């Protein structure tokens, strides 16, 4: 299933939906029709676990594509939000997780040229998250080096504590697209959180595709363009640490909980690694895509205080 958080109008409350063809079906409203108490938020559905997804699947099967009035709107008329508009915790970011990106970072960002022996983990606060179409803010008083990174986002479905690698994917609820926006000139004594954790620095969406539709997350093409020009293109098979490695490693010391998000790292092609270096500026438009999930598009706007 492709699950979204959406509004029917600017004034309408956020709702949980499932995409069926060219429609967004309201999950809670559909459940009410067919006698199932289904949640109206993404976190609610994640918390409901497998029984919640099975109940939703039963309702969709019963509807047979003919959705009662008031339960569906055209996808084109829906305003999509970030699938989880406000994560419960910081996003787990993974640095230097594609071999070629390790090399370009060593050349331009003073990181080690040696491949990491363990995942490099940082975090992005919940306030970094923006939904499809929302603006990435550029504050020229803070940064002159605003960079892009397309990533596969992994959404945890069940509590994972000290899990084995071979069991790790059982804890995944689904997958999405994220842009890890980075202010390269805001690293502080080797710490990345201010560089990567500023407001609007985690564009996220357009949906969450449930894990059953992506049984192997290590075979997905991903790419990013700026102003229509391709900057990144790779495949998740080139990850140094695979999704199951990341879940096993993080959960060895930090309990992963339902709704947690892992941004699994970016391939080569970031602005800092180019010759000459390239950065995002107000007026630019960045587009990111992961195969089988979808595409997000974001303008960059001037947010410099007077």
Image (cartoon, grey):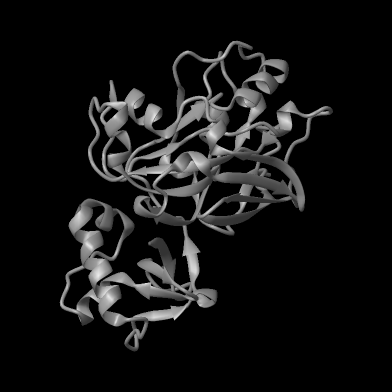
Q: Is residue 62 left or right of residue 110?
A: left
**Quadrant location of the C terminus in the rendered image:** top right
Of residues 303 and 104, the one nearer the viewer is 104
**Quadrant location of the N terminus in the rendered image:** bottom left
Residue 265's place in the image compared with 202, above or below, is above
Q: Based on the displayed image, in which of its 4 quarters is residue 52 positioned? A: bottom left
Residue 137's place in the image compared with 59, above or below, is above
**For the point 48% across and 38% down, which residue is it?**
218
Single out the residue that lies furthest toward the right.
Answer: 276
Please state the horizontal and vertical placement of residue 112, each as a whole percent of the image: 61, 11
Residue 220's place in the image compared with 243, above or below, is below
Please state the horizontal and vertical placement of residue 287, each as a whole percent of the image: 65, 52
Single out the residue that lies furthest toward the bottom.
Answer: 69
**For the point 22% across and 51% down, which residue is it?**
47
Of residues 156 and 237, the one nearer the viewer is 237
Please state the horizontal and vertical placement of residue 268, each as a whole percent of the image: 67, 31
Q: Is residue 234 left or right of residue 127?
A: right
Q: Based on the displayed image, in which of its 4 quarters is residue 201 positioned? A: top right
Please state the horizontal and vertical placement of residue 186, each as a whole percent of the image: 62, 25
**For the point 46% across and 55% down, which residue is it?**
82
Q: Is residue 61 left or right of residue 195?
A: left
């Amino acid at each position: 299933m492709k699950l979204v958080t959406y509004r029917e109008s600017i004034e309408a409350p956020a709702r949980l939906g499932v995409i069926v063809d060219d429609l967004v079906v309201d999950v809670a409203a559909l459940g009410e029709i067919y006698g199932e108490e289904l949640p109206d938020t993404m976190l609610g559905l994640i918390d409901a676990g497998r029984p919640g997804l099975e109940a939703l699947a039963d309702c969709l099967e019963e509807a047979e594509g003919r959705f009662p009035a008031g339960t569906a709107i055209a996808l084109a008329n829906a305003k999509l939000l970030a699938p989880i508009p406000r994560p419960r915790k910081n996003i787990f970011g993974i640095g230097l997780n594609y071999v070629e990106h390790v090399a370009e970072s060593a050349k331009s960002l003073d990181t080690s040229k040696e491949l990491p022996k363990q995942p490099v983990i940082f975090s992005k606060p919940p306030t970094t998250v923006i939904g499809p179409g929302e603006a990435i803010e550029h504050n020229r008083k803070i940064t002159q080096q605003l960079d892009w990174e397309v990533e596969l986002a992994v959404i945890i479905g069940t509590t994972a504590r000290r899990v084995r690698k071979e069991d790790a994917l059982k804890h995944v609820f689904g997958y999405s697209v994220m842009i890890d926006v980075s202010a390269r000139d805001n690293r502080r004594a080797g710490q990345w959180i201010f560089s990567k954790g500023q407001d609007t620095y985690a564009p996220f969406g357009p949906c969450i595709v449930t894990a059953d539709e992506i049984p192997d997350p290590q075979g997905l093409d991903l790419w990013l363009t700026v102003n229509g020009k391709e900057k990144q293109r790779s495949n998740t098979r080139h990850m140094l640490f695979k999704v199951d490695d990341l879940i096993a490693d993080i959960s060895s010391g930090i309990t992963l909980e339902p709704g947690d998000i892992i941004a699994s790292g970016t391939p080569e092609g970031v602005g800092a690694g180019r010759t000459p270096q390239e950065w995002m500026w107000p007026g630019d438009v960045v587009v990111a895509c992961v195969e089988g999930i979808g595409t997000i598009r974001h303008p960059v706007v001037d947010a410099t205080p007077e």
